[in-house]
Image (cartoon, grey):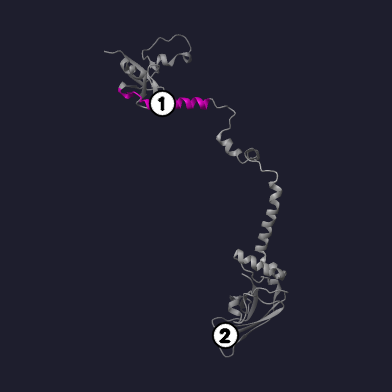
Amino acid sequence: MSEEKYTRCPGCHTVFRVTSQQLSIREGRVRCGHCRTVFDGIAALVSLAPSARDERDESELDEVALGPPTVTLRSAQALHAPPAAAEDEAKREADAEIRVEARPASSPGPEKTYGSRFSRQHWAKTWEPPPWLYPASVPLLVLLLLGQSLFHFRDAIAAHWPSTKSALVTLCAVASCRIHPLQDIAGLSIEASDLQADPAHKGLLLLSSTLRNRAPYAVAYPYLELTLSDTQDQVVVRRAFSPQEYASGAADIDGGISANTELNVKLFIDASATTQAGYQVYLFYP
């Protein structure tokens, strides 16, 4: 019978019962059937026979020579001869470990690299703009600012400087926009208003109001809000009317209320379901 020996897996420290014939395959290279670690079974041989302890400190005793107090002993059938591919993989892993250990201690970690990529020093090293780029970009930025201003304030520019309206209309044809009358609520006022019951129709009220555009340019038609209140000045009903509802059919709503002109408004209101003692008219833009 072949002499039995014991070898220990360096990965999980499992001890296997082996023979010399088994270790002679692939020059002692075996793979642990428990944790799949490939190791040298000859170099990892251990003795399970107890040895005499001398008076040396226990920390200085050779654990490999003495063996651990308790071991997991498995049959040699759990050991497998590693294929050539496994040996190559083990060598590559060993080489990778050597390369990792050879990395300088001063090399920045992943966390440090992630945080430093937003620093000015990092971008100064990666890309440095040419000196002429800054002065060359100033005219471009000025043109972009002017273009944005013309787009957002085109209605006010066309109202205050009528000579620019034709050019703005041409630009809007390219930019798919339109020139509208300026929404200037400060330029509008209610010159007169009156609310009377229609004698011919019970519950029907007639609102007459005169709107005046005091601005020297056309102003967009506003919304008209009518509020009916009771004797305690509490709101009974409130209703807002769009320009299409109160302006006459001949009015040019898209063109706005002409400069320094008045607009007469007449509205018939069904108030049969309410009781009111007062009213208020208010102009606003939505």
Where residue 274 appears, as percent x and y from the top left, is 56, 81
Which residue is outermost to the bottom? 200
- Tell me where residue 282 appears, x and y as whole percent: 65, 75
Q: CA distance from mark 2 to mark 1?
A: 100 Å
Number of residues whose C-alpha sits closer than 10 Å to that of mark 2, classed few (under 14), some (14–19) or many (20 or more): some
What is the three-letter code of the residue carrying label 2?
Leu
Q: Which residue is mark 1?
A: 88
Magenta stretch containing residue 28, yes or no?
A: no
Callout 2 touching callout 1 (CB < 8 Å): no
Q: Main secondary structure of the magenta part?
A: helix
Kind of residue at disc 1: Asp
For the record, the magenta segment spans 77-101
**What's the mark number on residue 204?**
2
Task: Please tell me how crowded label 1 is: few (under 14), some (14-19), or many (20+) other residues with Cα within 10 Å.
Answer: few
The residue shown at (68%, 57%) is 143
Quarter-of-image position of residue 51: top left
Towards the viewer: 59 or 82: 82
Q: Give residue 21's position: percent from left, percent from top.
A: 31, 16
Q: What residue is rendered at 42% in x and 16% in y?
A: 64
Indicate the quadrant containing the N terminus: top left, top right, bottom left or bottom right.
top left
Task: Name the N-terminal-most of marks 2 and 1.
Answer: 1
Quarter-wise, where is residue 264 in the image? bottom right
Residue 157 visible in rendering: yes
Relative to 272, say whether 110 is above or below.
above
* Residue toward you, 203 or 28: 28
